[in-house]
Amino acid sequence: MSFVVYAWLASFFYGLVSVFGKLTSKYAIKNIWLFNFLYALFTLLFTIPLALNNHIGIPSHWGNLTLSALFNTLFIIFYILAIFNLDVSVIRPLFNFRTAFGAILSYLLLQEVLNPNQVLLILTIFFAGIFVAFDEKFSLKSFFHYSILYGVLMSLFLALDSIYINKAIAETSLWETNLYNPLITIIFLLFTFPLFYKDLIRINLMQVAGVASMALAVAIANILANHAYSENVSISTAIIALPLSLFIVFALSFFAPRLLEKHTLKVYAIRFAAAAVMIISALKLSL
């Protein structure tokens, strides 16, 4: 199968993650701390068979691996907060902040050079992000709201997680990092156990199915993306960066407006245009 097909399938499954997450937060799980724990748990469970198949061992270094897990924990917390508080059509484009933060952090932590063109692209990403958050009020207050901060912090911690995952892989191996990162994440999230144990006792099949669907979609998307990247990086990156979740929720806003979200065509047009600017800028910045 062509890498293009793998890339499009990966993009589709990544789009489903936020959709499944929003449906679960809206109709199944109201306790964010239970959601965090279950999402991390199922991510780990779907990783274990793949890791065992790749003959993983015990890591020889734990520093960067632990830091990556810490930032992964913070990413999950703010990602789920974003799902609870933002439209799907806002969340997915905000992931492009990750590329901007990655460039800034590489400059600050790794002493990499930022040229004027890269600085301009970073500013463009943040400026376009303001318009992604626009609603029917068409006010800047739509962006400067605490709920948008969840999306921004989500992308920041994801960028930090990526940096330390790369360092951990260099110290250990790919699959040891893939397994022990979510395992340590679960340990960190156990500190929030008092905040969700009562709801955990009363957990039902609908709640489990919602979070498991998210984790499974991520696992499938990652496998497909790795297949695509193994044959072609640039074209695969461009396809996978497409926020197909925007198209999914846009279609659902006509056929099932009460299911997830409903906005005017003008609002969606602005969000699509802003997302396009962010994606193009992020792709140029990553080249």
Image (cartoon, helix red, strand yellow):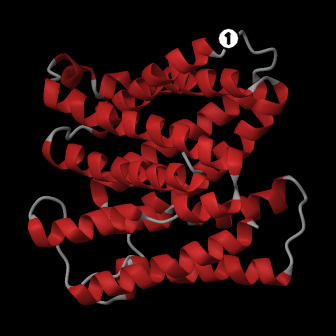
Q: Is residue 98 above or below residue 185?
A: below
Task: Say whether residue 184 is visible.
Answer: yes
Q: Amino acid at mark 1?
A: His
Residue 239 point in image, percent of width and height:
54, 63
Query: In screen coordinates, is 266 left or right of 122?
Result: left
From the image, tell me which residue sits under label 1.
55
Query: In screen coordinates, is 102 left or right of 260?
Result: right
* Nearest to the observer: residue 5 or residue 248: 5
Write the residue at 83% across / 62% down: 107
* Nearest to the observer: residue 135 or residue 140: 135
Within 10 Å of disc 1 (Cα), the crowding (few <14, some 14-19, many 20+) is few
Residue 10 point in image, percent of width and height:
48, 49
- Element under disc 1: loop
Task: Say whether residue 87 is visible.
Answer: no
Number of marks in picture: 1
Write the residue at 9% across / 64% down: 256
Residue 156 point in image, percent of width and height:
60, 56
Write the residue at 44% across / 50% down: 9
Write the residue at 91% across / 58% down: 111
Query: In screen coordinates, is 46 left or right of 248?
Result: right
Residue 173 point in image, percent of width and height:
76, 24
Q: Is residue 36 above or below residue 193?
A: below
Quadrant occupied by the C terminus: bottom right
To which quarter of the image does residue 69 belong? top right
Judged from this view, the residue extending furthest toward the front is 1
Quadrant occupied by the N terminus: top right
